[in-house]
Image (tube, grey):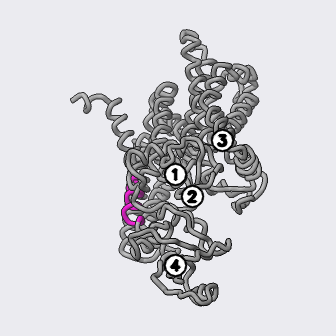
Amino acid sequence: MAFTTNPQIRTQVLLVASCAFLFFYGLGAFGLVGADEPRYAQVAREMLSRHDWVTPTLQGKVWLEKPVLYYWQAMLSFRLGGVTEQAARIPAAVDASILVAAIYYFLRRFRPGSELDGALLVASCAGTIGFAHAAATDMPLAATFGTSLLAWYAWYENNENENSKNESSKGRRVYLGAFYFFLALGTLAKGPVAPALAAVIILVFAALKREWHALGRTLWIPGILLYLAVMLPWYVTVQLRNPDFFRIFILEHNLARFSQDVYHHRQPFWFYVPVFLLAMMPWTVVLIIAIGDRLHGIWSRGKEAFSKRADSYPLFLLIWMFIPIVFFSASQSKLPGYILPAVPAGALLISEYLNFRRKEERGEGIRDWKERKFSHFFAVAHGVLCGLLIFAAFSVDTIMIHGRPLVTTATYIGAVVAAMAAIGISAALVSRAGVRVLTRVTLVAVVISVAVTIRTASAAIDATQSARPIAENIQSFSQEPVPVAIYNISRTQRYGLEFYLNRSAEAYENGNVPAVPHVLVTKQNTQLEVASLFPGRRVSYLTSVPAQKLDLYWVGK
């Protein structure tokens, strides 16, 4: 009975259930994909096998491209659940849950009444869900960085709020201590980018508010010592054990990667605009409206918007959201995960806007025909976007295999479900309930999309994007480990193959041709070319992996 009558318990149960499904469902439904997932998982596996918590290695060679936080998390996960795809991805799912919990408790303390909506908003963004299913360093950074900025703003608001005079200085500094603690974890997650971004965001915020004293108070000696105590031991130890660490990690994989296209990740300057809008799906329309509303409010109030009396929270969120996008847009190397730290800020900005609209509906209501027309357009646009998300979920498998959606039974069903969802969500939003039901009805569309994607597309993702089927084909010919070589295949296929076989593959391109009999993985229809590389040796066709356009050969003596 207590459960059914206590709204706080119902809220927390809903939030836990949402995170459990959105982040943990289907973690092992398909193999590791891309170049990063198998590499990071393999590094953690090797560190665990050596009982080494300091030096990352890849195929036995020191590998210093990334800091250690994800590896530590994956090592613990592997120890508890074995070396599996699910265990490799659990750290990101846990980190996403921690971020959602931090947002929930921050809003409950500082923006009561919006805590559930704000937390569900962050949890239901495509970027959050996607990277919560990835064995990578992006979600650990986003979670620790986002929590640290929430802690800093909690300290700032408590410190500046006249009503906080009754609260002890010690109590307020707990938030500042949390800021430094999670910032140190962010530094362990992905390096100096965490403190650099935080410093720029806080500096820009203080400059616009003309509150330079906030910067001085932020530089709190106990907090700085806490930051160093958490972050520094690993950095010092790994440098002492590996003298090349500073050159490789700081100079090559931070400064050089930012200033030069070292790893062929060049994209146009505006690349992160569509990436961010996609990461905010299905909230993209609401985000655009919220940004426009807040910018219009700042413009209309002029200097008053930056005064001490003005509400600083929307301004802080705008700065937090825009700085990572601008910062990484200037980088010569661009990958989608780089701007994941901006997603929580975008979601919180939407939450703040919806909270404002909700209060308006409760009070004066929609005041004139222009606002009513605007609300109807917003409802229809958001409903259509949710419908498109559902339709895309039903079409992912054919897109992965054929490069485009095909007219199948699944796409017909998807079209019907998407149309019903679009109409239903639009109708709900133009009803008297309005924005009060927005988060709930959108969450239903997101849950359907995630469930359909995992259930129908996992096999296609596995067949086309993961090296798991390649390794399974090799292992089907011999229960014992056999030497493996590769020729003219992608780096993602190579790293994935090495993870699943748990051994290195010799690359013909590097002149590493095994003298002993071995399995060769190469592109389709290259048997004559392969045979020409081995005059006098027998080359026998074994099988193909058609979805990845690969052939497997046995190269004898």
Under circle 3, the secondary element is: helix
Disc 1 or 2, which lies upstream in sequence? 1
* 158 in the magenta segment: no
Residue placed under numbered mark 3 in the picture: 241
Under circle 1, the secondary element is: helix
Q: Which mark is residue 46?
A: 1
Q: Which residue: 32% across, 31% down?
A: 9
Left or right placement of residue 312 versus residue 470 in this view: right
Q: Which mark is residue 517?
A: 4
Q: What x and y, as percent, mark residue 375?
A: 51, 47
Confirm whether residue 121 shows in the render.
no
Q: What x and y, as percent, mark residue 263?
A: 70, 60
For label 2, the crowd category at 10 Å Cα-Cα, with few meaning under 14, some 14 to 19 and many 20 or more, is some
- Front residue of 423/323: it is 323
What is the total number of numbered labels drawn onto the structure image?
Answer: 4
Disc 4 or 2, which lies upstream in sequence? 2
Answer yes or no: do the residues labelled 1 and 3 have beta carbons within 8 Å?
no
Q: What x and y, as percent, mark residue 37?
A: 53, 56
Residues rendered magenta in the picture = 444-458
User: In the rendered view, would you say 535 is above or below 90?
Assistant: below
